[in-house]
Amino acid sequence: MTHGLQELLKAVLASPYTLPVIYGVVIVAVLPLVAGYVVLVERKVMADMQARLGPMRVGPHGLLQPIADAVKLLLKEDIIPEKADVWIFWLAPLVSVTAGMLALAPVGIGPAFQIARDINVGILFVAGISSLGIFGIVLGGWASNSHYSLMGALRSAAQLVSYETAAGMALVSGLLLGGSLQIRALVEEQAKQGVWFVALAPVAFFIYLVASIAETNRAPFDLPEAESELVAGYMTEYSGFRWSLYFLAEYANMMVVGSVATTIFLGGWLRPFAGVGGAAGTALDCLPGALLLGVAGYCLYRAPKQPVAVQKLVMVAVAGLCAALAAALLAPVFVAQALWMKPGIHGAFWFLLKVGGYIYLFMWLRFTLPRYRFDQLMRLGWYFLIPVSIVNVMGIGIALVLHWERGMHLALALGLTTLMTLAVAGVLVRAELKREEQLRQGAAGDAYAG
Amino acid sequence: MAETTQNGAGQAGSGSAPHTLLGADELILNMGPQHPSTHGVLRVKLKLDGERVAGSECVIGYLHRGVEKIAEHRSYQQFAPYVDRMDYVAAVSNGLGYCEAVEKLMGVEAPPRAKVIRTLLTELQRIASHLLWLATHALDIGALTPLFYCFREREEILKILEKYCGARLTTHAFRIGGLQYDAYDTMEKDVERFCADFLKRIVEYEDLLTGNRIWLGRTKGVGVLSGEDAIAMGVTGPVLRASGVQWDIRKAMPYAAYDQFEFDIPIGKNGDTFDRYVVRMEEMRQSVRICRQAIGKIPAGPILAKVGKVLKPPVGEVYHAIEAPKGELGYYIVSDGTVQPYRVRIRPPSFVNLQAFDKMARGHLVADVVAIIGTLDIVLGEVDR
Amino acid sequence: MLDKVIFYFFAAIAVGSALLMITRRSAVHSAIFLTTTLLATAGIFLQLRAEFLFIVQIILYVGGIMVLFIFVIMLVNLDVAAQQIQYSRQKWVALALALALAGQVGAMLWRAGKLPGQGLLVRGVPAAESLPPNAEAVARSLFGPYMLSFEIASLLLLVAMIGAVVMAKKKV
């Protein structure tokens, strides 16, 4: 009996489907927690920029706020509008959140840890599946049977169609340089060339940055849920758990676009100057550990200043955690026996740091900029981003041909074509400024014709 | 199935509204009375073609309390606190208008010291009101952060008001005939400190907004109101001045102590939302200028003119208007010689300015509707009374 | 074994939702079932290790269906449409066509069974790792032997796009 069980266990472990399933369960279990804490970080960052404190009540410095919020959302009444299309109303948030989570599957957090597996259309998979999430938004907005929701849904659909093209073109630029769709191959190519693709294709990175903000419906492109115009856009009629699913989907999507940008443009799990070895390389390897040690030291320094004993304890605990992580990060650098840990743990550190930085940029923009108007959003997409991204792809293609066929230095060729792209962008911007000037002098009332 | 689809489309297209862009139905959208950016309980019925406004109708009255009727059953002093509740973000200005109107009716004049202190507080209140406008207007257009910065500065003003009269929002700061409270000891120092800080801070707001391309795109050419239209509809205040009409009651018919101070009246050129923004920003600077002139020049003397405990104005009627932060705030009071007014009619600037809304919003998008409501700077307590 | 389970799972979904698609009264419900059908087909592609086709199917149809949704929402008066009779005069024509198609497929399957080794039945698939990356394989065949037809197809799409732009310009 026990023997049979062991056999079964062995067979299950040997199956190629086992690990992906486990990883899937881990994503579904961990992602909500991570998203909750990203929300907390966002609120804290926002408070810092707005001269206030942010959540402070639940736990020390509001550290338990996400859990309190989650409990509140789960216990809230689930309101379904009377004339809503009940089935679609139920289904829509699930579609959004499933797409967001599924898209994370092939993302590689380090050379040793790919969330599911390295399928050979990795980047396309991430981009394609994550755009399925829009279905949830459109369906939810339609099913709510409310005008605000419907307008949010329509805006969202139009926004996706407009910006998906630009984002796709920007990705193509990166893929041309990497020569593969596979996530691991893309990062390895950047390691081989010794340079992140953001340096080779800055325009493409910029376009992807803008388009990804628009695709995740974040400010200044948050028109589908524009609070001051459409109340909450497609989420207006949702409450409680279903509402939190939409929220979760939004943050999952932020992580997805952050991961894609990091993988293609920011060198994935590579540390800065990945090619540098020797003493300088060792110094760079020490950076993550030193950073965390610094955080630990700061926490210890602040601990006596906390007003309540519990807060002091938590500060010390956080410091201990950081110190432990620092030890784990430093060990492979100095101890030969721990060297096998290095790619995994350091890769994960750099990858998460870069994704975090990307998401921080999103937050920063959100608190700084006003919101675009819908026609302006469309103009920006169709009249600027799409033409520039197409020219950029052509430029990179030309540069690669010059490099391969004529043996021109890659950086030189890319520099020339980037200048060309920038020139086109300049012409477009000037035309736009001229048009605005004309509009201002002419009939100001008809600012939206065309 | 295909045929069904065509039939449906045909009916929608040919039947109800053939003039919309795609021949689709017009959408009636009820904005408010519960909506994040209608600034209270304004309800706007929008007729939409897609997202474009084909027509609009403002439904008001959700905050109607019958203030004018209440006045007929209160003595003159008793009614004074009620006016604070009209434009509740500029209570001091409301009080000034009412007190001066009753004083005019009775033929008394506040002593010079009271006049200067009134002017000082009213200008502080103007800054506070404009700050609240800037905060909410920027929030409506999607800029989150100016809200908190503006409230930080407004807090300083409210603190000064609190130190002066004990209340922050509905202050009831003035009395008929002058003041009840004299300026507190450090008031001039507080105001001076506020003015110095504020001039630095206002630069920060302009850094965040004035040159921002998104902000320019959202405000320039939006909600244009020509000078003639503005005059024809009786629009007053910053909205009128942004349309290029130089009309400010503080200059045209000076009241309180405004004739003693130097200040400019900023005017705009195009009458769009951006001009209104610029005009109000400049007005805040001018208010600081007035406050700084008032500091150190508050004359000594009594703060209350000789008025009896029971006010019995002679039979007659009076109209007195002041330049409230939102425009011309007028009080028309009819006295029948008793302790209670026979009739009080209030001309609230928000109510009159709101008339221009349909003209400004037509042809714009839903997002602009929000910007236009914000730029009109209405307070529903005042619209509905 | 698992391959077969996955295949029949997706196939059942595809057929079932295709049936639901043509029988639903609400146009939006139909569109949702159309999406489900297409996604299930994509799943079958994935089961066949055609990862590139799988993802292209998803990416293309997301945009396409989105436009369909918008048309349904904006142009179809759903309340009216739901009242109307669903199967109109096309009923018999459609039945005849469906039967003809079924006959054709059946005949093909029957013949395939007769010629062992050349059938349409799913053969054993080599492990994914041993296959060449099929994005490259698709690219090679598109820009190699099928260059001409590929270019003709893109030209056709371009013409359609220009046509749409011209028509839209005229109307506004």
Image: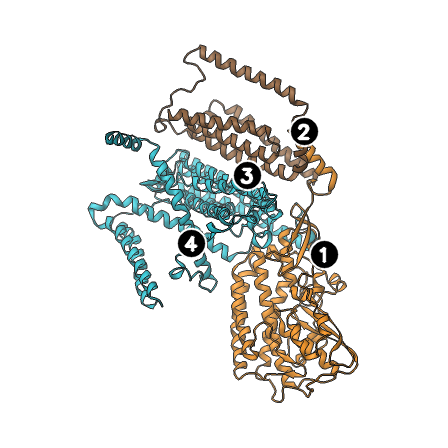
Disc 4 is placed on an element classified as helix
State which quadrant residue B313 falls in.
Answer: bottom right
Question: Left or right of A47: which side holds A321?
Answer: left
Q: Residue A66 bears which disc, if any?
A: 4
The single residue placed furthest to the front in the displayed view is: A1
Q: In the rendered structure, which amino acid carries the disc numbered 1?
A: Lys
The x, y position of residue A448, in whole percent, is 66, 49
Residue in the image at 39% along x and 61% along y: A61
Front position in the image: C82 or B138: C82
Q: Gap in Å between the C-alphas at discs 4 and 1? A: 46 Å
Query: Which residue is under mark 3?
Result: A87
User: Which amino acid type corresponds to the residue marked 3 in the rendered image?
Assistant: Trp
Check disc 2 and report the residue beneath it.
C85
The answer to whether marks 4 and 1 sit on the same chain is no
Viewer-nearest of labels 4 and 1?
Answer: 4
Q: Which residue is mark 1?
A: B359
Q: Is residue B192 in view? A: yes
Colour seen for chain B: orange
> Which residue does the image show at 66% across and 71% down from the upper left?
B324
Q: Any idea which chain is the cyan one in this picture?
A: A
Q: Gap in Å between the C-alphas at discs 3 and 1?
A: 42 Å
Disc 1 chain ID: B
Q: Residues within 10 Å of mark 3 (few under 14, many from 20)?
A: few
Residue A213 location (% of width, % of height): 49, 48
Label 2 SS: loop
Residue lying at the far top of the rendered structure: C114
Hue used for the chain lettered C: brown
Q: Are marks 4 and 3 in contact (CB under 8 Å)?
A: no
